[in-house]
Image (tube, rainbow, N blue to C red):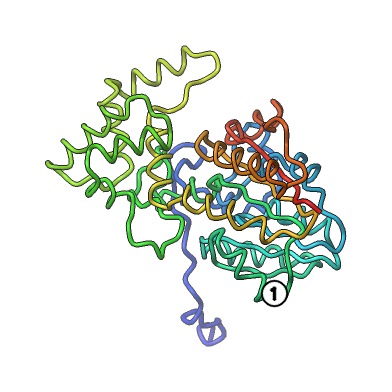
Amino acid sequence: MGLENQSNDSNQPEHKRRQRYSGTHPKRFEQKYKEHDIESHPELREHLIAKGKTPATTHIPVMMEEVMEFLAPKPGEIAADCTVGYGGHAMEFMKHIGPNGKLIAFDIDQTELERTKERLSKENVPASFYRSNFAGIANALSNENIEGYDIIFADLGVSSMQIDNPERGLSYKHDGPLDMRMDDRLKLTGADLLKTLSEEELSNAFWELSDEKDHWKIANMIVTKREEKPITTTSQLVELIFRAKKLTAKTWKQKNLESKSGLPHPAALVFQALRILVNDELGTLKELLRIAPFCLRPGGRIGIISFHSGEDRLVKKSFRDGFRNGTYQAVVKNVIVPQKNEIFTNPRSASAKFRWAMKAI
């Protein structure tokens, strides 16, 4: 009788315990379950930011106040965010241009684009989303039946969500496949380029795209070691870079501790250069700078945040040339960089440089 009155739980889904991790705090990306749902844990977000850390699966927008001040979005305007990412800058644009303006958002990362689309759909401002790189801003004009944008904005940095995910292979801090593709439709990965490029091509890339002073030594080490075993993971590449620089993880850690301001990681510049190469980031930026004047309305503003000297040189030259030939009626005189307090709360903003220009009326 008692058995008959008991509920039958055989059809109920089995509760799965979260995987345990050693210590009191999760260290691996997949273990940070609270950070993956950070909106449900606002106290954790504030705690991490106060410590100068970015919660996993989120991104802290760089120089928000400066971007809004100089691009000056107004009610009813049309803003194109060419690298919408987590949507930090985009959401702020929407607050200024709404409710009658419109946001046109672009990103090549399909996963992040869908998440951001859902997040921004809560705002009371019309928005369209395109899985496209910078070149797509021209095609979108006809699709949207508009003559031009009032604002074109691009943050050229890699988002924290992408850096922190080991599966993307973008960070020297996490072991994972050496992928580095921002767009998974691309055929060649970072591992593919390390396998096929010549020693001279690798050396030139490391120097031209990131100013790596040990470019030749590292390229030589890669070519030598790939004959023994393919280089397919981030940890393999980091180890080769350490060896080329005659360092070990222990000696590097000691040098960093002895430095008062902290030193850049020995692998940072090579990872940057390889990522730029995989995604043809400079080629895409050149195309954006070429077509932007034709996509802006008279008096429209363009703003670009770059993170290394090669990008910044291209932006500076394009805006300067546009001012001289009358395309732009005003351009920034001195590059804008983050304030010290922003760098403290968001260390990844340290190398950011912001430039803007206004199209002639």
Residue 141 in the image: above or below residue 205:
below
- Pick the quarter of the image with the C terminus: bottom right
The residue under the point 50% across, 54% down is: 284
Q: How many marks?
A: 1
Q: For mark 1, does the 10 Å Cα neighbourhood hold few (<14), some (14 to 19), or many (20 or more) residues? A: few
Residue 340 in the image: above or below residue 270:
above
Residue 110 in the image: state x and y as whole percent. Answer: 52, 65
The residue under the point 78% across, 46% down is: 68
User: In front here: 145 or 97?
Assistant: 145
Residue 317 in the image: state x and y as whole percent. Answer: 59, 39
Q: Circle 1 is placed at which residue position? A: 144
User: In front here: 83 or 249?
Assistant: 83
SS assignment at label 1 = helix
Q: Is residue 358 shown left or right of residue 182?
A: right
User: In front here: 148 or 242?
Assistant: 148
User: In front here: 270 or 231?
Assistant: 270
The residue under the point 40% across, 35% down is: 208
